[in-house]
Amino acid sequence: MVYFARWKIILIVGLCLLGVVYAAPNVVFDRQTAAEMRESLPGFLPVRQVNLGLDLQGGSHLLLRVDWSGLVRERLEAAVDGLPSALREAQIGYTDRGLDGDALVFTLRDPGQAEQAVEIVENADADLDVAFDEATGQVRGTFDEGAQAEIRDNAVAQSIEIVRRRIDELGTTEPNIQRQGEDRILVQIPGFDDPQRVRDLLGQTARLTFHLVDTSASAGAGPNVQVPAGRILIPSSDLREDGTPATWYVLHRRVEVSGENLVQASATYSQGSPVVSFTFDGAGGRRFGTLTSENVGGYLAIVLDDEVISAPRINSAILGGSGIIEGRFSLQEATDLAILLRAGALPAPLTVLEERTVGPGLGADSIAAGEIASIIGIVAVVAFMVLCYGLFGVMASVALFFNLALIIAALSLLQATLTLPGIAGIVLTVGMAVDANVLIFERIREIANGRSPISAIDAGYARALTTIVDANLTTLIAGVLLFAMGAGPVRGFAVTLSIGIVTSMFAGIMVTRLMVVTWLRRTKPKSIPI
């Protein structure tokens, strides 16, 4: 235990120096300077700082609810819309096609075709539970409880992913986006102090579709006009002074191209006004080219969340798979619309249940309080160790410094988010960091009488090692479980606690022992000053 191979000495010293170097930017640079350097220098260089959580640097906090009430009906409507062509191709006659509550229904003219009709409905949506009523000749398709639960669960998971994409487009660092309960999503964005913009971005479903305009029916269209079969009535996004839509459009129900085919969208300028340019994928580009080729002179409505934001005239075929969306946009509105289109459409609307904004002043107070608590804790621990163990206590205190440097370096390299509970975890590990040394020094003190210093130190480390590993391993297991099963601040505490346990074992066992062994070899003492 008192012998160190050269490679071990190099490894220990190297890790300690790396810890100091990678922790230094948190002390030397302010956050703005560090951010500028991080963008201009390679990522492996020591310029990264610890990410501060919402409670330390301020930001926006929102609790959202996924409104999945219409999801089942939308799936049924999609299946209903796809049935006519399939039934017609199979030469199956039917009547009364439509929805009956949460069920797809239609009546067969020839009950003998029931088996084939059921197969067609099942192919329209694999999750449908399809039944045929011989008495009425009716085919009925429904989603059972398991299928409905899966639809809702998938909607929440997809919503979380799209919310994450939209937030990432804002350029924020380490947002916390996680599921809470069955239908809620927690969004915390540290350092972003424009909650209204976040609310606007997340409040839009961003379902983009392209429809042909029925120009004859649109003339003089209003909110109560009756539209022909196969048509839909959609208002424009432009509003009059009284808040009512300025224009109403009668559109073909068929979606010619949808936002699912978009691969790129960005804000730009056209004739001095902000617009959104977009590009389709290969399939979307071909459909868009065919659509514009066959309808030159007609009008194409661009519909976003059931509002016509633009209905330009098709002057010529657009074969490149790209175009622009014009509207009365400001640059910010065009940028946000491009973000929405790039991120994709939400499967269901989101409702804001709770919204909070944390000011940076409160975070600064929390940081200051955490710094004071850490300093007091360190001073108290160092004083105790020096008073109780003398020179060995000084060595343990030096190891404690390297332990703190390693914790900060690890948080910086991992870009983990430090929260107020995370600071509490660091303060806790300050006390735990010297626990290993206390056990070792007490063992040495117990067996020092009648033994040489080398023998006593060797036996002390050997006897305490098992106890140290057991104690820290059980605490590490608790930290891992807190991280795996906890959320938000609990996970922040678990991260710093777990990192602190690992670094404290390294500092307490390896760093302190290296200093003790170096002292033994150089001074060759007759007794142990402990």
Image (spheres, grey):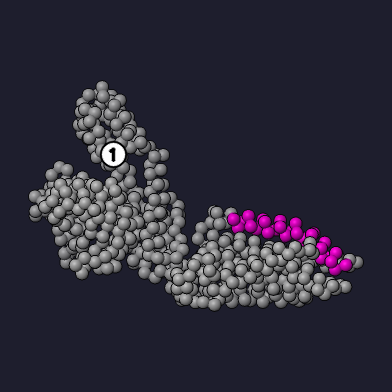
Q: Looking at the image, is 375 positioned above or below residue 327?
A: below
Q: How far from the left and from the top, in percent, is residue 491?
A: 54, 60
View extreme (right): residue = 450
View extreme (top): residue = 112
* Left or right: where 110 falls relative to 172: left
Residue 102 seen = yes
Q: How far from the left and from the top, in percent, is residue 425?
A: 59, 65
Residue 205 seen = no
Q: Looking at the image, is 152 positioned above or below residue 245?
A: above
Give the residue pinned by disc 1: 79
At label 1, counting other C-alpha atoms closer than 10 Å, the crowd grade (few under 14, some 14-19, many 20 or more) is: many
Q: Please report the residue visible at 79 percent of the width from the left and 66 percent of the height from the top.
A: 442
Q: Quadrant of residue 385?
A: bottom right
Q: Please report the residue visible at 71 percent of the width from the left and 63 percent of the height from the top.
A: 7
Query: Residues in magenta?
Result: 452-480
Q: How far from the left and from the top, in percent, is residue 205?
A: 31, 55
Q: Please report the residue visible at 46 percent of the width from the left and 63 percent of the height from the top.
A: 174
Q: Looking at the image, is 449 positioned above or below residue 470?
A: below
Q: Looking at the image, is 479 positioned above or below residue 393?
A: above
Disc 1 secondary structure class: helix
Residue 467 magenta: yes
Residue 493 magenta: no
Q: Quadrant of residue 228?
A: top left
Q: How far from the left and from the top, in percent, is residue 204?
A: 31, 58
* Left or right: where 39 falls relative to 326: right
Q: Please report the residue visible at 37 percent of the width from the left and 67 percent of the height from the top.
A: 195
Q: Report the quarter where the N terminus lies.
A: bottom right
Magenta segment's dominant SS is: helix
What is the three-letter code of the residue carrying label 1?
Ala
Q: Report the quarter where the C terminus lies.
A: bottom right
* Left or right: where 382 falls relative to 1: left
Q: Closest to the observer: 241 or 410?
A: 410
